Amino acid sequence: MKNIKNLFLITLISLAVTSCFKDEDDIIVSETEKTEEINDFVWKAMNSWYNWQDLVPDLADSKADDNNTYQAYLNQYSSPENLFNSLIYQTDVVDRFSWFIEDYIEQEQAFQGISKSFGLRFQGVQINTEGDVIIYVRHVADDSPASAANINRGDIINAINGTVLTTTTYNTAINGLYQDDVTLSFVSENAGTLTAIEDKTISSAVISENPVYLTKVFSDIDGKKVGYLVYNAFRSSYNDELNDAFGFFKDQNISELVLDLRLNGGGSVETSVYLASMIYANANTERFAELIFNSKQQDENDYYNFANTLNVYNSDSERTGTQAINRLSTLNQVYILTSGNTASASEMIINGLAPYMPVKLIGTTTYGKNVGSITLYDSPSSDYLNQSTANSSHLNALQPIVFQIYNKNGDSDYADGFIPNLAEIKESDYWNVTLPFGDENEAILKTALDDIRGISGRSTVTKQGDFKLLKTPLTGNKFENEMYINSDFISR
């Protein structure tokens, strides 16, 4: 009887172990099949839409002629992201912009300004030859953890999580600004000497940032009313707020406009068209921009004309109505404040308005992004455009470059950025005297106002020195320098 019991127990254990192995095998097979399925989506979507499809040998149509060879090719890649990255044309040289999306819901929220962060924009600067580094705060989002901690534009930080910033420690220490919690050490500066003030610990939170940050009118600049707008992203869910800002300018009857795009990395092409239409009212059906797609998608080539009405969207990117655009007929030129963060849809404004009116640039050379993207989903029946029919087993998607943008004259030659044509000024040269946005004496804004006054376009603010900017590591927000069109605008 004992032997029978032992045999029964061994049998149960064997069955259990076999069952475990079978479950694990099923999981492995399932994950493998899922990877193969997503790999197929990645290749076919890129083959159909990628801007440089004809220049990437592995995206040639003939790659899929023989199914066995095609499957063997896809199976070389252990992850869809690796496959995607292998298909990018001259990574970091030509295509610096395409990316693989792990979770397209998170991405769509980011496009509308909803993300988890401290609400802090910053710049690292090497302040002496000994390698000492500080971070100065460029911007604090309203109703953010940084705002709640009473952190302000112009504040100076010299340590993150206890690590003093130097040229050696900067790249590692700066990653603390992309974690859930961070401790920042604030200092004051006097004659090159830094003095500790206090430490502040803040926790990241989900915030929804209104990109229409500041709307202001200077009522008497050499007898003129000057509108000033700090606009930080082209987010379609804030089209109505942008329109309200220009309604205010219209009511105030401004005759000059200073558009501050120093922190604006781009966003919606549609919103860029609306902003251009607000600035320049003397064009009705004239062309503002043209989008050119690859040879397979030539039917999608499209003109964007100046507009008289705009679409209003909610935070879920759903259209909720339309509004008449508040268009200014009083402007003969526009001043645009720029930096290396001024990109894509912001540069589209510069390029698109140039044939119609003088565009005076003050600041530093812009980012240089004359191409844009759409989100591609695993929905082959819609040529990868329709999220509602996407494969429900995963949330992967693609954000590849699919078009290049041109102005009325066919100009698109700004891949190296726009160089300021009025005055080249580095904000970082004034890191220890950074004034709030809208302060009439803030170095870059003052240069625009002085030009309106008839004073030389060169800055009349004494700069503190020539300081070296440090690049922000790539762990930052990858959505900041994007120019995209909604897939809904392409019918399938």
Image: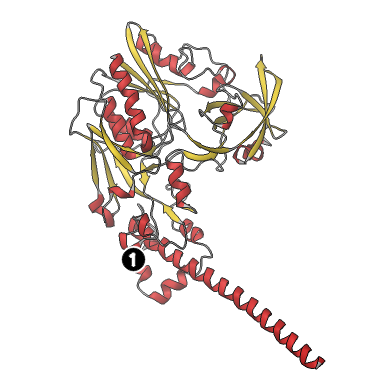
Does 458 sit above or below residue 173? Answer: above
- Of residue 376 and residue 428, the one placed in the foreground of this image is 376
- Of residue 199 and residue 100, the one placed in the foreground of this image is 199
For label 1, the crowd category at 10 Å Cα-Cα, with few meaning under 14, some 14 to 19 and many 20 or more, is few
Does 246 sit above or below residue 491? Answer: above
**Extreme residue toward the front, this view:** 1
Instruction: Tell me the quarter of the picture where residue 146 sits.
Output: top right
Does 343 sit above or below residue 129? Answer: below
Check disc 1 and give the amino acid type.
Asp
Instruction: Tell me the quarter of the picture where residue 53 sits.
Output: bottom left
Count of numbered tags: 1
Image quadrant for the C terminus? bottom left
Q: Is residue 58 visible?
A: no
How far across and how far down the image is residue 77, in percent?
A: 51, 65
Task: Please tell me which residue is depicted at 42% across the width and 54% down the height of the picture.
Answer: 398
Q: Is residue 147 visible?
A: yes
Tell me if 262 is positioned left or right of 163 in this view.
left
Task: Please tell me which residue is depicted at 71% across the width and 34% down the height of the picture.
Answer: 163
Looking at the rendered structure, the secondary structure element under dot 1 is helix
**Extreme residue toward the right, this view:** 2
- Of residue 89 and residue 320, the one placed in the foreground of this image is 320
Does 281 sit above or below residue 107? Answer: above
Mark 1, residue position = 61
Task: Please tell me which residue is depicted at 70% across the width and 35% down the height of the picture.
Answer: 161
Image quadrant for the N terminus? bottom right
How far across and how far down the image is residue 172, in percent?
A: 66, 40
How far across and how far down the image is residue 353, in percent?
A: 28, 29
What's the image's color scheme? secondary structure
How far across and how far down the image is residue 400, in percent?
A: 40, 51
**Extreme residue toward the left, this view:** 285
